[in-house]
């Protein structure tokens, strides 16, 4: 019995159904604002590596986390590859394997503990009255914890990677 390829695994996921439609024309990369800013992200390269079964390179790398979800690639793809959705499917696989960049671990902890991704500094808090803004109210995380519990996300443990 043959082992399932990485692209087949992706295709079975919500969002990953169209990955094998790609014929590597490069329209996605030329449409991508992130690819224009950094060589660390190229949607065409991500799709190619997935199709070539380079699972470890994709899941261990940082490129899938750099997509800004602008959907330029999907809107312009002549083959109707849902590239951003494919990247979401690959991210979900990475999350299940515990391959999550530290920043997401920090975001998860901050939002589940404080209700905000970024703590409001004392400086910003002191500046609010000068700007005519009321004091910030406590966020309260009860509703958020209920959502996390209902969706099962509270049982999901993000593992913080050790620095290399």
Image (cartoon, rainbow, N blue to C red):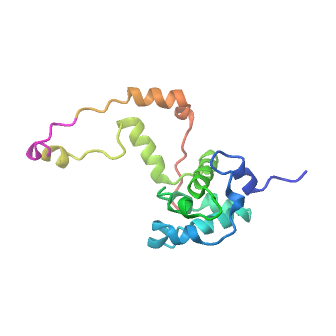
Count of all numbered marks drawn on residues in the image: 0
**Residue sitting at x 57%, y 70%:** 27
Q: Position of residue 52 (x, y in %)?
A: 73, 65
Compare residues 81 and 41 and report the one nearer the observer: 81
In x, y percent, where is residue 84?
56, 56
User: In the figure, residue 109 lies in which quadrant?
Assistant: top left
Farthest-out residue, right: 1
Camera sees residue 130: yes
In the rendered image, the residue lying farthest to the front is 78
Above or below, comparing residue 148 to residue 43 in the picture: above
Residue depicted at x 14% and y 41%: 133
Q: Position of residue 130 (x, y in %)?
A: 8, 46
Q: What percent of the width, then of the height, locates residue 151?
A: 54, 31
Q: Nearer the viewer, residue 101 or 162?
A: 101
Residue at 72 percent across and 47 percent down: it is: 12
Specify the principal SS of the magenta part: loop
Q: Which residues are magenta?
A: 128-136
Give left or right: position of 95 versus 4: left
Q: Look at the image and say whether residue 39 sits in the magenta stretch.
A: no
Q: Is residue 62 visible?
A: no
Residue drawn at the location 72% of the way across and 63% of the way down? 51
């Amino acid at each position: 019995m043959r082992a399932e390829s990485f692209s087949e695994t992706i295709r079975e996921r919500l969002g990953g159904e169209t990955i094998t439609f790609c014929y590597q024309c490069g329209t996605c990369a030329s449409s991508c604002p992130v690819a224009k800013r950094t060589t660390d992200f190229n949607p065409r390269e991500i799709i190619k590596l997935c199709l070539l079964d380079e699972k470890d390179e994709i899941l261990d790398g940082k490129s899938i986390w750099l997509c800004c979800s602008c959907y330029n690639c999907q809107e312009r793809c002549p083959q109707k590859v849902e590239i951003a959705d494919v990247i979401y499917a690959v991210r979900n696989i990475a999350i299940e394997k515990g391959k999550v960049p530290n920043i997401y671990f920090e975001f998860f902890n901050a939002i589940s503990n404080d209700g905000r991704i970024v703590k409001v500094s004392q400086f910003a808090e002191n500046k609010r009255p000068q700007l005519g803004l009321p004091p910030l109210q406590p966020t309260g995380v009860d509703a958020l914890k209920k959502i996390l519990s209902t969706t099962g996300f509270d049982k999901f443990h993000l593992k913080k990677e050790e620095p290399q």
